[in-house]
Image (tube, rainbow, N blue to C red):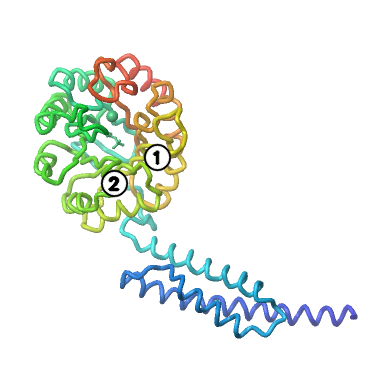
Amino acid sequence: MSPDQLASLRERIDGLNSGLLDLLNQRMELIQEVQEFKARTGRPLFDPARESEELTALMLENEGPMSADQVRAIFKEVFKLSLGFMQQETRNELHVHRGDQPDSVYTIAGHSFGAAPQLIAGPCSVESDAQVHAVAERLSSLGVRFLRGGAFKPRTSPYSFQGLGVEGLRMLRGAADAHGMAVVSEILDPRHLDDALQYSDVLQVGARNMYNYELLKLLGRTDKPVMLKRGFMATLEEFILAAEYIAHEGNDRIILCERGIRTHEKWTRNTLDLAAVPLLRQETPFPVVVDVAHGTGRKDLMKPMAKAALAAGAQGVMVEVHPDPALALSDNAQQMDFEEFEEFIAAVL
Ligand code: PEP
Ligand code: MN
């Protein structure tokens, strides 16, 4: 073959490449229409039966010189690209999709959340009036504006302390009010909604309830900020879709909380997934909080992980603080005492 012939073959290949590109783009336009229809009618994006039909038809039609395996390999790639494209398009249509929305910033009980980093701190469980008042006094003197405390506790064992219930919420509210703080507390049961609305400023949904879609829908119909914690086993896609349940009902004042996921690792209580922080920030407009207490279960890791969380772009860090952690009725290994917290805040903020 002469160089001229080679050049002319290459010219024809270039032409075919352009033709293929054009065909693939035309195909993608049709895929887009299919995606819109599927999204509207709730049909699954991945349809293995349809893929298999397409492959069989192509095999029968193929006259070579490409082998059946080569045809299958190429079209599998095309199908994979189409599915990825449909999934991205579907994410782009979510209420919680970032798009070109700016960062969400909320004013909660007079305090801004979502701009400068905020600490959410307080005891694991509300145990007494004296306990929450002591914590609120100390935290507020150090500049903390968000007071956490569990009144309804989702404990692994039904024989463990279950929280003081509504009485605990009242105590937390009283302590927060005395020191100009906002209340962050978990709601476990839809039957407690009225009390939660009355006493809390941020409705926390715990890891165990991330999949409780009826609870999420209910909170979506309120106008209180909701802090949604990631489930133990939840992928980020599932986490974002759980937030969508809230936003879909009209409440878009959402805070996402990474609190570690369950892996085979035993040296930490959970495995804190810090890559989730920039990913959630890219995908949604919501502030992200990292709970380094439940995320690690270890006081020696709180400082470095809190710094890492802020470096990764988190708008907040959550920790547990108790006047006397050794006597705490829940999570005593991971709660800081006042001196430890003072050192923590000096190192982190
Ligand atoms: C909590 O923050 O009080 C709590 C129970 O955490 P999680 O739901 O993440 O286990
Ligand atoms: Mn706890």
- Tell me the residue at 15%/25% (across/down): 175
Position of the C terminus by quadrant: top left
Q: Position of residue 42 (x, y in %)?
A: 32, 69
Q: Residues within 10 Å of mark 2 (few under 14, many from 20)?
A: many
Q: Between 28 and 101, which is closer to the camera in this rendering?
A: 28
Q: Position of residue 347 (x, y in %)?
A: 41, 21
SS class, disc 2: loop
- Tell me the residue at 37%/47% (across/down): 234
Amino acid type of the residue tagged 1 in the rendering? Ile
**Alpha-carbon span between mark 1 and mark 2:** 12 Å
Amino acid type of the residue tagged 2 in the rendering? Met
267 left or right of 230 in image: right
Residue that mark 1 sits on? 261
Q: Measured along the vertical axis of the image, is residue 121 above or below residue 290?
A: above
Q: Between 3 and 86, which is closer to the camera in this rendering?
A: 86
- Tell me the residue at 60%/80% (across/down): 59
Q: Measured along the vertical axis of the image, is residue 150 above or below residue 335?
A: below
Q: Position of residue 315 (x, y in %)?
A: 36, 38
The quarter of the displayed image where residue 290 is located? top left
Position of the N terminus by quadrant: bottom right
- Tell me the residue at 45%/30% (across/down): 266
Which residue occupies the extreme right position in the image? 2
Residue that mark 2 sits on? 210
Q: Position of residue 72 (x, y in %)?
A: 61, 72
340 left or right of 61 in image: left
118 left or right of 27 in image: left
Q: Between 219 and 333, which is closer to the camera in this rendering?
A: 333
